[in-house]
Image (cartoon, rainbow, N blue to C red):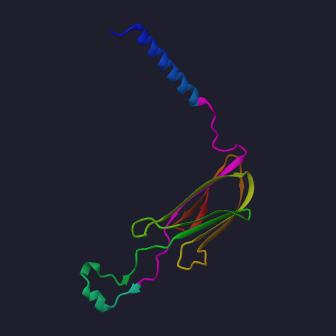
Amino acid sequence: MIKPQHIAGQIVAYTAFALMIGYFASRPAYHHHAPENALLKLSLTHAGQRVGECKDRTPEELAKMPPNMRTKQSCGRERNAVTLEMDLDGKLVFQQTARPAGLSADGRSRFYDSREVPAGQHVMRVRMRDGNNANIFDQKAELTVTLEPRQVFVVDFDEEDGKFSFQ
């Protein structure tokens, strides 16, 4: 038999729990970022160039291979690490080198950064190194942008065009 004091205790406990959930659902107020700032996001994946050069196979090498494996060139799977740098108003704000994903290091390198910046006009420079020469940036872009308060501005890389995209 259920006693009335047990039922009353459950009602009190459930009510307290419901009030606590209701309070924390609306308080304290959470702000993603300050309303007078903009949000700058760098989010991209990119596959670096293949390490080394492809080599041409001789007719003798091709003859020794099974018919379904006869390709004229032999290329390694491994890709270069990708280095990404971003300047904002002449100050370096992001610099990272990412190794390619995958067991054979043949996947894409991934980058993500999110930061608040003051609203207003900014000069942004982005550069990426993905080739075999460690001293040369293969991709570069410069943009003057006016950011509004609470605006989210995204920097990405368009693989088809081979250029940075800004949204």
**Count of all numbered marks drawn on residues in the image:** 0
Q: What is the x, y in percent for residue 127? A: 62, 69
In which quadrant of the rendered view does residue 63 lie?
bottom left
Give coordinates of residue 119: x percent, y percent.
73, 51
The front one of 13 and 106 is 13
In this picture, residue 51 sits left or right of residue 65? right
Secondary structure, magenta segment, majority class:
loop
For residue 115, side relative to residue 65 (left or right): right
- State whether residue 104 is above or below residue 10: below
Q: Residue 38: within the magenta?
A: yes
Residue at figure coordinates x 71%, y 48% from the top left: 37
Q: In this view of the protein, which residue sits in the foreground, 130 or 153?
A: 130
Quadrant where the N terminus lies? top left
- 104 in relation to 118, above or below: below
User: What residue range appears in magenta?
Assistant: 26-54
Q: Is residue 80 left or right of residue 87?
A: left
The reply to whether the magenta stretch includes residue 131 is: no
Compared with residue 44, is residue 104 higher up or lower down, i.e. above or below?
A: below
The C terminus: image quadrant:
bottom right
- Where is residue 23 shown, x and y percent of the image? 58, 26
Residue 52 x, y percent position in the rendering: 46, 81
Residue at image location 41% in from the left, 12% down from the top: 6
Q: Quadrant of residue 153?
A: bottom right
Q: Residue at x 73, y 59 (%)?
A: 122
